[in-house]
Amino acid sequence: MTASRINHPPADAEWIHDMESEDQPLMTDVFGSLTFTGDVMLKRLSEDVYKKLQQTMQQGLPLDPAIANTVAEAMKEWALEHGCTHYCHWFQPLTGSTAEKHDAFLSPDGNGRAIARFSGEQLIRGEPDASSFPSGGIRDTYEARGYTAWDATSPAFILRTGGHSTLCIPTAFVSWTGEALDKKTPLLRSIHAVSKHAMRILQIFGTDKGVSQVITTLGSEQEYFLIDEEFFNRRPDLQICGRTVIGAPSPKGHQLDDHYFGAIPERVMAFMSEVERRLYELGVPVMTRHNEVAPGQYEIAPFFENANVATDHQMLMMHILRSCAPHHGLACLLHEKPFAGINGSGKHNNWSLATDTGVNLLDPQEETHTNMQFLVFVAAVLRAVDLHADLIRAAVASAGNDHRLGMNEAPPAIISVFLGDMLNDILDQLERGETTSTKKGGKLDLGARTLPQIPRHSSDRNRTSPFAFTGNKFEVRTVGASASVAWPNTVLNTIVAESLDFMAGELQKKAGEDPTPQKLETVVKTVLKEVVQRHRRVVFDGDSYDPKWHEEAKKRGLPHLRTTVDALAALKTTEALNLFAKYGVLDNRELRARVDVLQEQYNTTVGIEARTMFSLINKHVLPAAVRSQTELAESVAATQAVGVECDATRAQLQERVEMITELLAATEAGREAEAHTVSSADRQGEHIRDKLVPAMARARAAADALEMVTPDDLWTLPTYTEMLFMR
Ligand code: ADP
Ligand code: MG
């Protein structure tokens, strides 16, 4: 294949088809590549430098700074060939989005001219002003110095925006004092912590040969809404808050389940294929697309990767989704709950552990009851979730996610684990002290002669569980659609590292040096039995929506943290501070700072939503309602003037006046709650939870009731029906 064909793939599908008949083409060959990886690196770097870089990328060995200049030069040449004039250090501050500061490759040559220059030092370290990013009090505004540091384990890429190309270098972001100011640094630290203790388990089982690290794998399924851009532009609440703060329900929601997996509308398909093409170029391996449950809701899912790269790719995915939508006259909504009463959007976080030689450590294999190593890993996760369910909940806490978790929607705010029949059966056996068999799924006979018999999984699926074992990985469904997956995975990795540390310690203590295989097996079964007995209460395979489960969970002592304010408290305990410090993920100051930022974000977000709501009520709802009241009044007066009784219309008018009175009263109460400020951010959060949020609910109810009775020609905002059903 020639280089020009690689870089400029023709758009027609036939060409792709031709390519497929050749020897298994790489996707990057088909779509072109804008990442500095694989072939691109191989072609541009000497074998020696390439090998060293690979050692860092694949085996997690420390980066050799001596290669930085060579790599920088090669990256620059490659970027210039792709039309880049600038590079940027691309990082993930605590705002939750990505940040980039562009610098030109230009450098004066001392003779009044400029040359293109990009040094190893520029690649390795950047120095953005840190003062305007949230630091949770770690930095004062006048203490501005911050650094970005090259993360060589995540490929550099070229981002095309507005017809311009920029070389983006994934980086960590720390303050001058060395404290993490971003989401990547603690994620990387947590990945190392898991690896360290998972390796100990492998050593105990003697399966560590040739393995240099254990990696955390991650595939996150992204749900999103698409609406017509015109409607988006006419809804200030969507523009400012990402969600509708008022809006009466459409007569049709997702009751008929006719959207889920339905035929993808033409315009949406065009959008999806542009998104996929651009993501392939950026090395994001997107696999799956389909309609989701709610009208106007869709999903995109990648193939899993190592968690650090997957996290960067997740951020890119959200960026590309948002930025491609307007090309198709659409707006992409990533908020957790853009429309009240309609299914919200999450991000299913599929998580597992694998050796760098490619063995999935959460793969149960055929005879699971004999697979003691797998059972140790699963038990470690169970134990972690049971001990730290509150931290898992806190890791996904945000104003947006409060509308999903804790409301009558999947997943619930009670964190439990679904294991399925096969694993539960083995846990029973472990509790009895002997493991003798593995339940098999068998074959499914479909009863029609022309259909094949298909193999059946050994367990059914469960859609309502917040933390489900799905065959060979855990699927964490609590993560919000707009969130970065970095923090939830940092927390998950940290609690699992602690649990693996505990398991390894117990096994080593009880088995002693060099145990015989028999002795080891006995010890493993003893430890597993203890862990299962103690922590099995967190397992729940039933319907998590069922109110009966909420009572049962309470009896079992499982925490139920409904709101962000309740959940964040879990991250402030001494136990949490010690845990994150012990595994080297965040020191006490860093963790405190992070929680402060999350609290501030919650307070600020709800404040903005409240002000947006009251402004919409004043500028849209009230004027429309008052006009319609006037119409009714005029109608009553005119009808009576000609001597005709109109009691029904008069009653309508009376009711309208009362509804408007309630709207005014509710808005006034809401305004008061919003204006009330308390000295500390924590207390402010409690005030918002207890006073402002209920006040907003009351004002919304009044506004939505009026929307239902206001004539269309007077209603100035796009309605739920329009936004959800116009494709
Ligand atoms: P579903 O959950 O809808 O059944 P899949 O099982 O195919 O879909 O996978 C959903 C996501 O889980 C995909 O992103 C997939 O790549 C990811 N995934 C599969 N195996 C693993 C694994 N071992 N580790 C992490 N993610 C995985
Ligand atoms: Mg799934």
Image (cartoon, rainbow, N blue to C red):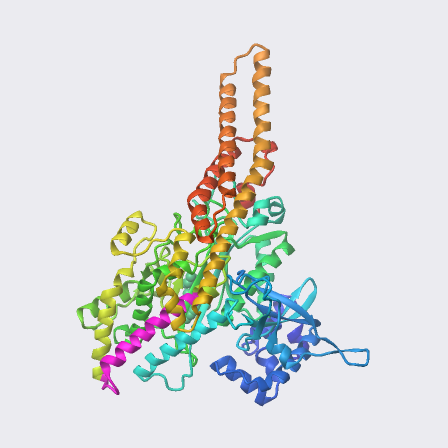
Q: Quadrant of residue 97?
A: bottom right
In this view, 659 is above or below 395: above
Give the dominant element type of the magenta stretch: helix, strand or loop: helix
Q: Nearer the viewer, residue 619 or 681?
A: 681
Q: Is residue 510 magenta?
A: yes
Which part of the image, by quadrant, shows the N terminus? bottom right
Q: Quadrant of residue 358?
A: bottom left
In this view, 161 is above or below 718: below
Q: Position of residue 177 (x, y in %)?
A: 53, 72
Q: Position of residue 631 (x, y in %)?
A: 59, 24
Q: Which residues are magenta?
A: 489-517
Q: Residue at x 42, y 61 (%)?
A: 395
Is 40 positioned to the left or the right of 541 in the image? right
Confirm whether residue 20 shows in the render: no
Q: Nearer the viewer, residue 574 or 611?
A: 574
Q: Is residue 312 magenta?
A: no
Q: Position of residue 128 (x, y in %)?
A: 62, 69
In this view, 574 is above or below 702: below
